[in-house]
Structures are given as C-alpha cells and as structure tokens.
Image (cartoon, rainbow, N blue to C red):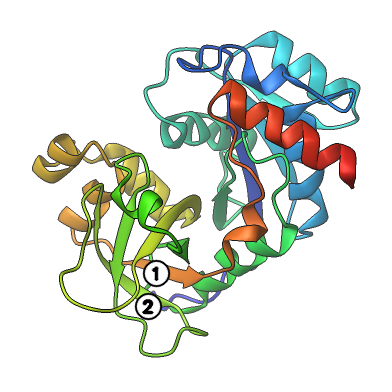
Amino acid sequence: MTRTAPANPIVLIPARLAATRLPGKPLADIAGTPMIVHVWRRAVAAEVGPVVVACGDRAIADAVESAGGRAVLTAPDHATGSDRIHEAIGRIDPSGRHDAVINVQGDLPLLDPAAVRVAVAGLADPETDIATLAAIIGDETALADTSVNKVVAGFADPARPARALYFSKAIVPWGPGPYYEHIGLYAYRRDAIERFVGLPRGVLEQREHLEQLRALEAGMRISVSLIDAARLGVQVDTPADLARARHLVERL
C-alpha cells in the first residue's frame, strides 16, 4: 500500500501524577491553572486534530474535563508515554480512523503550537514511520549534560527534515559542526505506533535508556526537523523549572 501524508491525526498528551523529581506535576499550579491544562490548550491551538489527555489518574482527567477538554483514563503503571498513548488510542479509536498519533509531552506549558505542526509535517515523506524534533545545542554546559539527549542527523538543508541515525546521551558525532538536542515530541503513523510498542527492548535502548533506539534497531525510519529551542518554552522536570515556567507565564 502506498503511504500518503496523514489526513486525520489526533494529538495525545500522556500524563501521570507519579513523577519522580516533581510528584503531581501535571496538576502544578501555573498562574491559577494546572500545568496539564496549559499544555492541552497549546496543543488545541496547533489545530492539527482533536486533542485528548491520556492520564493514569482520575484527578488529571477531572482537571482537563473541568477546563472543557477531553481525557481518557489508562492503566496507571505504564513504563513509558508511548505505552500510555497506545492504550489510549486503542480505547478512543479502535477502528483506526485516525491515521497518525501525535505524542505531546504533558510538561511543556509554554509549547509553541507551531512546533506540533512541524512534527506532523515530518510525516509527509512516505518512507517516514516516526517524525520528531531537534534544536541546536547552543552552550557547552547543555552539551556535556547527560540529561540532554542528542540526535545524530545529517542536515544538508536545515530547513528540511533529515533522517535520524542515532540518539545518545553522549556528545555525538565527532568533529567540528553543530550538535542537536532531541526534543521528545513525536508524530507516529498509526501503523508505526502499533509496531513500535510491540517490539522488544533493543540492546542499545537498554544501554542508553532511550526508547527511540528501539525503533532504529528494528529498521524503522525516524525523521527529524529542526526548530528554535525557544518554541518549547520550559520543560518542567524540577521545582526550579516550575518556578521559571510560572515566572514566564506571568509575563505573558
């Protein structure tokens, strides 16, 4: 079957309360609104398709639904966001009407809606299974930080997507030139998410603790598009991140 660009995407936002470094963060108050509601609103503003929060806790669903959004409850103990959205899409759309699933992380309260559209556009290439994003790493501290995941891709034209060749916590590749931070916002073709969650954990995934390596080891094609890092705003992982996000939202 010849692949085409997705015609009917859906955006899913996985969320759970049991975060290690910042427990309860989806419900963290930012300017009087739970963080997950900020993320939901920005995903809606992208206008790429319906937006549903896939949550492991009733309290998150209540917050989203109180704001006028839609939520679906999933098992609370999923190991990854990919597993959570896979369960959610099976509940929401068992007939497969939605041909692409966009995974937006629930800790990006200042996400630029345009970034979601860029990720979806990466699926225009019929050879691409999964599309994701990256940004140039601008300082040495971030480059050396193992919490900053790097992606290796040969951007012959920075304005066009490139194929992901590897992901790592290490500083790669060798030699002069830019380095790219991987941004964990994914656009999956529907058949790709079904295949991906059924794959066994690969050797490299277990070594690097990066699940996207599972797809590469299985021969799946991941497309990467460059965006300005400012389009992400703040990814909230720690109390300090939350304080910064609150400050930035109050200035809007």
Count of numbered labels shown in the rendering? 2
Element marked by disc 1: strand
Q: Of callouts 1 and 2, which one flags the residue occurring earlier in the amino acid sequence?
A: 2
Residue 175 image offset from top left, x and y in percent: 17, 76
Within 10 Å of disc 1 (Cα), the crowding (few <14, some 14-19, many 20+) is many
In-front residue for pair 114/171? 171
Question: Which numbered disc covers residue 238?
Answer: none
- State yes or no: discs 1 and 2 in contact (Cβ < 8 Å): yes
Q: Residue furthest bottom?
A: 157
Query: Which label sits on residue 223?
Result: 1
Residue positioned 52% across, 12% down in the render: 18
Q: Which residue is at the front of the view, 90 or 189?
A: 189
Q: Position of residue 44 (x, y in %)?
A: 80, 49
Q: Is residue 42 left or right of residue 102?
A: right
Q: Quadrant of the N terminus?
A: bottom left
Residue located at (27% from left, 42% from top): 210
Residue 34 appears in the rendering? yes
Residue that carries the numbered disc 2 in the rendered image: 162
- Against 102, is 80 above or below? above
Relative vertical location of residue 231 with respect to residue 51 in this rendering, above or below: below
Judge whether residue 8 can be spotted in this image.
no
Left or right, residue 11 beside residue 85 = right
Work out how far the residue at label 1 is from the one at label 2, CA to CA, in angstroms. 6 Å
Type of amino acid at the residue the image marks with label 1: Ser
**Which amino acid is tagged 2?**
Ala
Q: Is residue 94 above or below residue 185?
A: above
Residue 100 placement (x, y as % from top left) = 55, 57
The residue that appears at 90% across and 30% down in the rendered structure is 68
Left or right side of 170 for 227: right
Q: Quadrant of residue 163?
A: bottom left
Q: Secondary structure at mark 2?
A: strand
